[in-house]
Amino acid sequence: MRRMPPRSAIIVIATAVTLLTAQPATAAPDPTAGRTAPAVITELHHDTSPVLQTIKPRHAVGGPEEDDRPGTLPHAVSKAPDPVRQSAPGSGPKTEVGLNFDGVGQGFTGPGGVFNVTSEPPDPNSAVGASQVVEIVNSAFAVFAKTGAAEYGPATTNTLFTGFGGPCETTDDGDAVVRYDTLAGRWVLAQFANVNSKGPYYECVAVSQTSDATGAYNRYSFQYNSFPDYPKLSVWPDAYYVTYNLFDTSGTTFLGAESCALNRAAMLAGQTAVQQCFTTSNAYGGILPADVDGGTAPPTGAPNVQMALGTTNTTLVYWRFHVDWTTPANTTFTGPTPLTVAAYTPACGTSGTCVPQADTTQQLDALSDRLMYRLAYRNFGDHQSLVVSHSVAAGGSVGERWYEFRLGATGDPTVFQQGTYAPDATYRWLGSAAMDKAGNLALGYTASAADQHPSIRLTGRIAADPPGQLTQAETTTVAGDGSQTKHSRWGDYSSMSVDPVDNCTFWYTHEYLPIDGDFTWRTRDTSFTLPGCTSKTQDDFSVAVNPGSAVVTAGKAAATTVSTAVTSGSAQQVNLAATGLPAGTTASFNPTSVTAGGSSTLTITTSTLTPSGSFPITVVGTGPSATHVTSYLLTVESGNGGISNGGFETADLTDWKHTGTVTVVHSGAHSGAYAAQAGAPTPTKGDSTLTQTFTVPTGSTALSFWYDVNCPDQLYSDWATATLKDNTTGVTTTPLAKTCTDGTGWQRAGAKVVAGHRYTLTLTSHDDNYTGDATYTLFDDVTLTN
């Protein structure tokens, strides 16, 4: 996977000893940083996959190669004493290891054949679901039963996109991440595509249709003009959040971190999805979004907290991302807000590489310039916790700094406890942390020294232990028998997850080497528990809706069946509610509560005042033991059906989704007083789009619209175009091929349509941001005719 190049900065702050630096590199101002409104980006394509079990696994081709060496993210590198170092090992019992088996790595054999390593580092991470564990490495994955038996794979990650088309299917570029959506019982897998080019770049996301990881998936691709490196995926009730480190297309200029909210409700339902994105300044990178563990959702409407290292060695920083799918202008990304922590010194100084290994002089990277995946969230009912770790200097070695934050009434985090685990001279780094339902904390990491090969170890603490101490004796899950002899890259990240069935069993995934060399890595998947968390079956339930979406005209109603099921323990009473309703809409349940295993009818009634658009509605089931949510996508069309506000005579963009630079202008309209303008008379960057999804009413057979292109450039640089996707059949046509003309005035374009079919029309104007030849396009009178 590609990495950030070094960047430079020297800042003196008001302390006697603190000097902030970062590595030399090219950095450029980011024109999107500090914006108050998100960039709204519609998916490039989506479809439904065949059942994964029926897709033949693909295998990597080509010889081994190391990914580009990581650069250094902006962070403080000054030295400071560590006041929270734990210099003695825990004296409690070792963790109770359950399963401990090799995952995807050199020589691993599963139903899909034998895996051969073709790149390093492996980027190992995994997630655990109702009955399966999915492990994913840089560009391959496998599905396991909780017994450790492989059910599918190994397979390249793009196997999941077989038949999808485009770079998501044809490239397998890595940086893959897998999560299990415990609130919906779905798997989510993502990786980027087309990164070995000058762009455009893609993030490919697949959401399973059931809790079976070998079943069918709703598949999506999202396009980026800047290279979106180091994606980190998380689950939250209102969105799937993904964060990136952005580069320019040359891969040498760091633009800042980007955080995107993907429309979770739409993706669960297999509907057209959009994402809303914010970009920070280039002072920050490596942001992690909060990721839900357990079956109790965050409070309704709670923003997603996201964290990164701060600009001083006594701070982290955080943002609060609250997404509004109905009115994107109301979406907020608040921060960065400094969060004071105990002083730390990032491991390995300015080089980032200092970790020794046995039998070689090759040292390993500590990746101490970023927080380590995940930022794990758990709602305990009486409090909400976040845990995370990063690698810091500890005397002459390296230790793992860990934190538990708690969220206050306003949703802002404060430090509840923190510590640095460095009980001896062994180097410990690349950690991952999580908490079980009892409040116990587990930490996994790699350990290495000049007389030790890199090994995988675990420790932890019990909820009632003294704050800041990892009291459990250290456990080695696998002692490596080899060292990496040529390359410094190691792991890049690991992952600690918690079984959603008992919320006690941890699963940890990391890498090790069985012999000296390179491209010989293996991974290990380990389950374990900590004392005090009973694995006695807890009463729990699930909530689902069928159908998961509906399209209605304003003033009409839609109904769906809300079903519940006992997932463990005994049945309990579940109270039902719905949130996220658009204006002029009501929801009713019959009955309003059920015993788990029963069902209710949800009726959503719109009115003539209900606005057009797609609205993700959250169905909430609350029982004594847990709260679970599922999503229902309501799409409302105008009372007459068809195109809404096609002449823009509302003087705004009502009923149109838009990205880039789009306005309504009061001069030069084709008819009436107003027209839409995509782009601007001054240079803009990339695509400016207008999108509307509609159902063709009875009697209509054709779509038409008028356009006026103002394009003083050449067609290969700037253009106007339009696409029309028939969502009923999946076929996309191009009513307006790319065109670049100047001064020709209003022209008409159109396409045939079928009554009753649902379509998405996208009107686009593209400008290359070059001074002197700005391109923009006027659109007007979008209509359906007989």
Image (cartoon, helix red, strand yellow):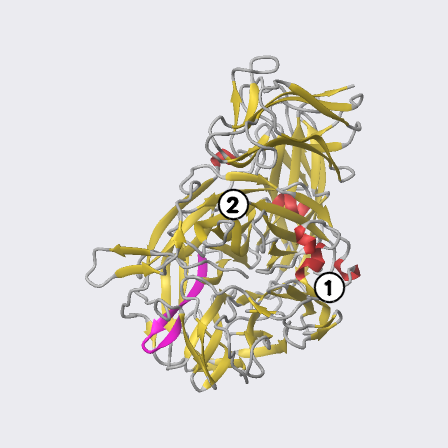
* Picture quadrant where residue 644 is located: top right
Q: Residues within 10 Å of mark 1 (few under 14, many from 20)?
A: some
Residue drawn at 56 percent across, 38 percent down:
325
How many angstroms separate mark 1 from mark 2 (CA)?
A: 42 Å
Question: Total label count?
Answer: 2
Along the horizontal axis of the image, is 273 left or right of 332? right
Q: Residue lying farthest front?
A: 714
Height in image: 60 above or below 562? below
- Asked which secondary structure carries label 1, the reply is loop
Which of the two residues, 684 or 718, is positioned nearer the viewer here?
A: 718
Q: Residue lying farthest left?
A: 16
Q: Where does residue 475 sit, x and y in percent of width and height?
A: 50, 81
Q: Report the amino acid beneath label 2.
A: Thr
Which portion, as a residue range, is magenta? 383-401
Q: In the image, is residue 535 part of the stretch drawn in magenta?
A: no
Height in image: 294 above or below 617? below
Foreground disc of the pair 1, 2 = 1
Q: Where does residue 319 sit, x and y in percent of width and height?
A: 42, 49
Which of the two residues, 149 or 237, is positioned nearer the viewer here?
A: 149
The answer to the question of whether label 1 and label 2 lie on touching residues, with beta carbons closer than 8 A, is no
Residue named by callout 1: 58
* Picture quadrant where residue 707 is located: top right
Q: Report the amino acid beneath label 1.
A: Arg
Q: Where does residue 616 sit, x and y in percent of width and height?
A: 61, 40
